[in-house]
Image (tube, grey):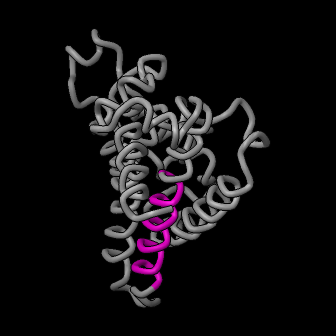
Amino acid sequence: MRRDAEERHERIVAAARELYCALPPERVTHTAVAERAGVGIATLYRHFPDRDRLGEAVAVDVLHRAVDLLEDRLAEARAAGSGDGRRPAIRAAWEGAIDGLVELGIGPLVPALAPESFEQLSPPAVELKNAAERALGGLVSLAAEAGLVHPGLTTRRLIATLIVCTRPPTPGVKELEPQVGAVLVRLLLRGGWAQDPGE
């Protein structure tokens, strides 16, 4: 792909990602994405002939970003060593990972883009999903060792909770508390995940 075509491709994917974070999935049309990306509709269709291919590209892009984020935060946490003074560094890496996932938009993006079953993901998406889960699992283990989360917290429960908490609220809820998702995430970080959900 030529550099100018690659740049257009990246702009289109970024525009679609932003729209999926801001709008219901059914309103993320090729026309809306083209307008947001600043390209002609014909250009968009040359890159992504249908909605499924565009959604797949956005999903792979977000997974790439998630893997980079989580692997970086995991490396930071591991670099803290094994002494008593490592807890603040692990906390910083842990909270940075969670905040980063929220900023990526996993709340609106996963429900909009994920297939009904993970078995339907493309091979590149599966590879990236597994890499993200491995890195997140490492962070969860370190956070549990540092007493930041309950030892029984699993990566899948963590992700499911985070997605539910950060999905766009209904207009009525948003009117009551515009930052409700951020409030819930802070509560989780400040002790919610430290509790045994069975207690």
Which secondary structure dominates the residues rendered in magenta?
Answer: helix
Horizontal side of 81 relative to 190 (left or right) equals: right
* Depth order, front residue of 160/26: 26
Q: Residue furthest right?
A: 119
Quadrant containing the C terminus is top right
Q: Is residue 164 magenta?
A: no
- Please determine whether, in this image, residue 185 is positioned above or below residue 173: below
Q: Is residue 74 magenta?
A: yes
Total number of numbered labels?
0
Q: Which residue occupies 52% across, 29% down?
A: 112
- Please determine whether, in this image, residue 76 is positioned above or below residue 143: below
Q: Position of residue 173 (x, y in %)?
A: 29, 15
Q: Which residue occupies 20% across, 14% down?
A: 175
* Depth order, front residue of 175/194: 175
Q: Position of residue 107 (x, y in %)?
A: 44, 36
Q: Which residue occupies 33% across, 42% down?
A: 187
Q: Residue furthest top?
A: 172
- Please determine whether, in this image, residue 27 is positioned above or below residue 36: above
Q: Which residue occupies 29% across, 29% down?
A: 35
Q: Position of residue 53 (x, y in %)?
A: 60, 38
Q: Position of residue 4 (x, y in %)?
A: 36, 59
Horizontal side of 53 relative to 161 (left or right) equals: right
Magenta segment, which residues? 62-78
Image quarter of residue 54: top right
